[in-house]
Structures are given as C-alpha cells and as structure tokens.
Amino acid sequence: MVRFSFLDWLWLFLYILLMTGCGILFYRLGKRSEADFFLAGRGLPWWIPGISVYATHTATDTPIWVSGVIYKYGLRGIWYTFFSAWCAIAAFVSARIFRRSLAFSQAEWQSLRYSGLGAELLRGWMAGWGAFLNMFILGWVGMAMGKLCNYLFGWDKWVGLIIPSLIVAIYVLSAGFWGVVMADFQQGIVAFFTILIASFWGVKAAGGPSAIIEKLSSLGEMWRLNPFHFSGFFKGDFPLSWFLTMIFIAVLGGFGMGTSIDWYAEAQRIQSSKTVRDASYSIWWGTALTLTRNSIWAVAIIAFFVIYPGITDPQQYEMAWYRIAFEHLPAGLLGFLLAGIIAIHFSTISTHLNLGAVYLTRDLYHHYINPEAKEKTLVLAGRISTAILLGGSFIYGTMMEEITKWLIFALWIMGAGMWLPNILQVVWWRFNSWGYLSAWIANLGFSWLIVWVLPAFGVIPELPDYMQFWVLMILTALVYIPVTFLTKPEDMRQLTKYYAMTRPIGWWKPVEREARRIGLIK
Amino acid sequence: MKIIKRKWKPEEADRWTKEDAIAIIVSPIAYALLMIGLALSCFLLIKGFIILGFGIILTWFLHWVIDPKLKAISKEYEKKQRDFLKHLDNIIKWREYE
C-alpha cells in the first residue's frame, strides 16, 4: 500500500475536476449532430487527434506489458512494441484512402468498397464484432485499474473497475467525441510528462546511466543493451525469424485496413481530422510519440533490473515500471504520478466507449433500424449506446479471469489469417465481399485447429506464434482466393464510385479505365 | 526535371508516385531509428546519439518529400467532399445512388 500526502490528493482531485469540466465545456458542440458526437465535426488539426492516438495507446496495462518484455529480453524486447509501426505506411497509404472514403467506421467502409448482400453482411458483422470488442477492451482495461487500486490502496477490485469508468462516462455522454479528443489532448500531455519524470527518477535511483552500464557489466548482462541480440535464426527465446516476421506483419500491414486491432480506434481519429494531410500526420506523429515513450519506459525498466536482478516470477517483474515509480518518487509527486495513470486510463476508457457507440449507432441503429432518424435522435442513440457499453464492460470486467484466454484467442484470429485479406481489400479491385467473408470463416476454423485442437491431440507440435501466423496465412488463402475467383466481381458502378472517392493504391486498372470512360475522373 | 517534385497540380497529386514510394520506405526506418536511438541515448552511448540523429534527419526528409503532395491532395479533395458526403447519406438510407 502507498501512503498519500495532502498534496498528492490535491493533484488528483484537481486533475479529475479539470477532466470532467472539459467534457461539460464541449457539451454544446457534441450534441449538434451525429458527425459531431462521433467525429468532432471532421474539423480537427492533426496535433489534436495525434495526441489522442498517443493517449489512447497508453493504457494502464501498457507499462505492465512493456515491463514484462523488457525485463525478460532486455532492450531487444522493445521490438515487441514495434507492432504499432504499421502506422509508418498506413499514415501515407490506408489513412489517405480511408479519410477520402468519409466512412464513420470500418464497418461503413465495407459498404462503400463492396456491394449488395455481401456488403450488408459484412457491415452487420463488423459492427457487431466492433461493439463486442470495445466492450471487452473496456472490461479488460477497467479490471487492470481495479488491480492497480487494490495494490495501491487495498480497495476491492470492483471499485477501481467501476468508479473511474463512471467519471469518464460523464464527459463521454455529454460531449461525445469532442469530449474524448479534448480530454485526450490534456491527458496525453500529462501522461507524457508523468512517464518522463517517473522514469527519470527510476534511472536516478539506479545511480544514473553510467552506473547502470557498470552494474550490467558486472552482472555479465551487457547483452541487455543490444537491441539486435538474437538467439539464432530459429532457435532460442529470441530468434531472428520472429523478428523478421514481426517487421513483415507490422510494416507491410500499413497497406491494409484492420491488420492491427489499433486500426479501429485510429480510423475514428483519421476521420475526425480536418483534411487528408491532417489525417496522415495525426497517426504518424501519434505513433512516433508512442514508440519513443516505449524507449523511455525501456530505460527505466533496465534501471529496475540492475536494482532488482534475477526476478523470475513474471507477476513480479511485470510491475517493474510501476514499482520504480511508486517506490522512488518523493512525496507530493506521487499524486502527480497517479494523476498521470488516471489520465492514461481515462483516455483509453473514453475512446472505447465512444468507438463502440459508433458501431451501435451509425452501423446498426441508423443503417438498419431507423435510416430516416433526425440528428437529435441519433445523438440520443449515441448516448444510450455509450451507456449500454459501460454497463456491459462492468459485467465483462468481473468475468475477466475466466474469459481472457478465450478472448485473446479471438483477437489472434483477427490478426493471423485475416492479415492478408485486410490488405487485399485495399489494394486489389477483384477481391470481393465473398472472398473476405470466406476468409473470416476459414480463419476461425483453421485457428481453432492449428492453435488448439491439433497440438492438444499430438497431431502437430505446438508452434511458436510467429510460425502460426505463416501457417494460418497460407491455409486461409487456400480458401478465399478460389472463392474470390469463383464468385462475381463487385458491381462496377460501385467500384468506380469508390475509386473516384478514394483513389486506392495497387491493382485497380480495370476500375480506373471504367471511371475515366464514364467521366468520373479526368 | 527535379528528382523530388515539390509543386503539384491537383490531378497529378491524386496519382501514386515515387514521392509516395519514398515516404513508404523511409517512414518505418525513421520510426526504428528514433525508437532505438532514443533508448541508447538515454544511456549516454555515442552510437545512440548517432542513430537518433539519423532518425531525426530521416523524419525531416520524409516530411520534406511528402508534405507538398499531401497539401495538394487535401486542397483538391475538400472541394469534392460535400458531394461525397451526400453519397454517404444515400448509402445509409439504403437508396440507390445514381
């Protein structure tokens, strides 16, 4: 348990007051229309959604995860965090295409790219999956806060799960995405300085940079400062083949939409940007900030290692960054640290509350139930959807221990076999909705077999995750490529309209020719 | 003709060109250099400062190459955005678009 002084509590109270006050300030803007409630009116300069990208991807459980990989693998573990580098290419390719589509969500984009029954099936499926996924993430992150409050103050876990989320709900319900993005802006700045100050104190506690290097040397652990210290091509705990697969997935994934789970939150920030240029820079700089934040964390965690070497229990070393911060910051700054942690927690919760509500409101209610709804009704639907997600997240949060394993598996399904279809739908005109749907179904079956069933019965050995990726990618392709060629291409009128709007990259020649012939483009 | 085009007409900017290819190649390298360079610099290692320096130069170069094109695309697209929003409105209302 940590003891707080009056100054610590004051920091915290003032910060929460600022946060909720900010939401109420933007109440009038948020209620103007559906586009205001979910996209802040599509008028933001790049640095506001950019800081929001950074704030959203700094969650309460992120330092726990980063601590785990850096303590275990040293500086080479930082490559685990390089998955977010999909934005390197996405900023200049898929963000440009998606921003030009003007779709509110990835589900809506499906109905611009595809046509007919296939498009509707995809939109409904993506919207349902999106709402569920956001509810799950809310429960997951909420429970991480519950555990942290239990560690700090000895409170029951449900207190940390419910109370912070209820405070966030005040400004998300009031101002929608306006509240989210404006609160994210200040949360991002507070979180950045908190991480910087706490990490600096950690390095100081270990004796400074030179002392850390000396201690690593005396422990015979200098390899921990080498980010390219591989254990072999296939062998060992950090093989080069894993690294190459990670670079392949992360970097080339930027040509697609949905190759990373983070795409869906980023998509909302891309659409809220004022122009295509703002959209590109928002995710490029937001991710640059995220990656450099990981560097700062890594340094502090290596400092923790030289103070406490030889910890073998992951539950212990995964708390490295939190421990070095709480154990070494002076009284008065602890409240500032907790305010920073609250900031990163609030930004993640608010993002997923509003994003989940987009799917329920725009893609399900507005599209299927009440297509003629007025703006006032849609904003009300947005608020009701937000409240449903909040309630659902509390239920998920309390069940988390039982369902986490299943849901991580579900996320893996999205990542492996769907990686290539998510790129093909952007770069290849002939890829159709039936190909995409068959990929989903095939991937579900193959993931089940390759990851669980066949290894459990000893038919195949348990493969490392990067090998599973390649196997699932190839097996799924054996299904969706034939399905694509055996079914008709999408309606050419739909494709030409989509082409004129978005100007996609890749193999679109037949569509481009047709769009020129009918005069849609010059 | 200049190697890097810095003045764009709207119809030219809509096409995918070598400036986009440069951004696509340089951008992930810049990310990796910034991330690794900063971490090593915090340990006051010379190689860290050199890597970080290269990362900053590449970041500047990336923006120098792509920014004029992004500006041209944005300017042109904003003119068309209103019509495209109408199209989006028709799709959500399940109307056939002409």
Image (spheres, rainbow, N blue to C red):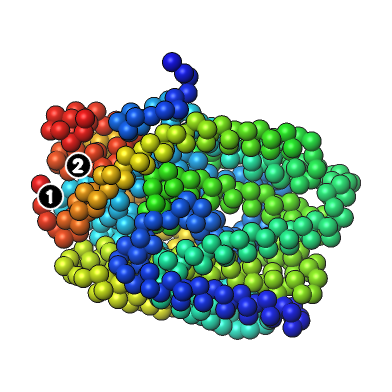
x and y percent of residue B72 in the render? 38, 36
Label 2, secondary structure: give it: helix
Q: Residues within 10 Å of mark 1 (few under 14, many from 20)?
A: few
In contact (CB < 8 Å): disc 2 and disc 1? yes
Label 1, secondary structure: give it: loop
Q: Is residue A257 above or below residue A121?
A: above
Q: Do the residues marked 2 and 1 share a common chain?
A: no
User: Which of the numbered marks, if any, corresponds to residue B97?
Assistant: 1
- Quickly name the residue at label 2: A497
Chain letter of the residue beneath label 1 in the structure image: B
Residue A371 shown left or right of residue A269 in the figure: left
x and y percent of residue A205 in the render? 84, 60
Q: Is residue A456 visible?
A: no
Q: Residues within 10 Å of mark 2 (few under 14, many from 20)?
A: many
Q: Residue at x 69, y 35 (%)?
A: B53
Label 2 – label 1 distance at C-alpha:
10 Å
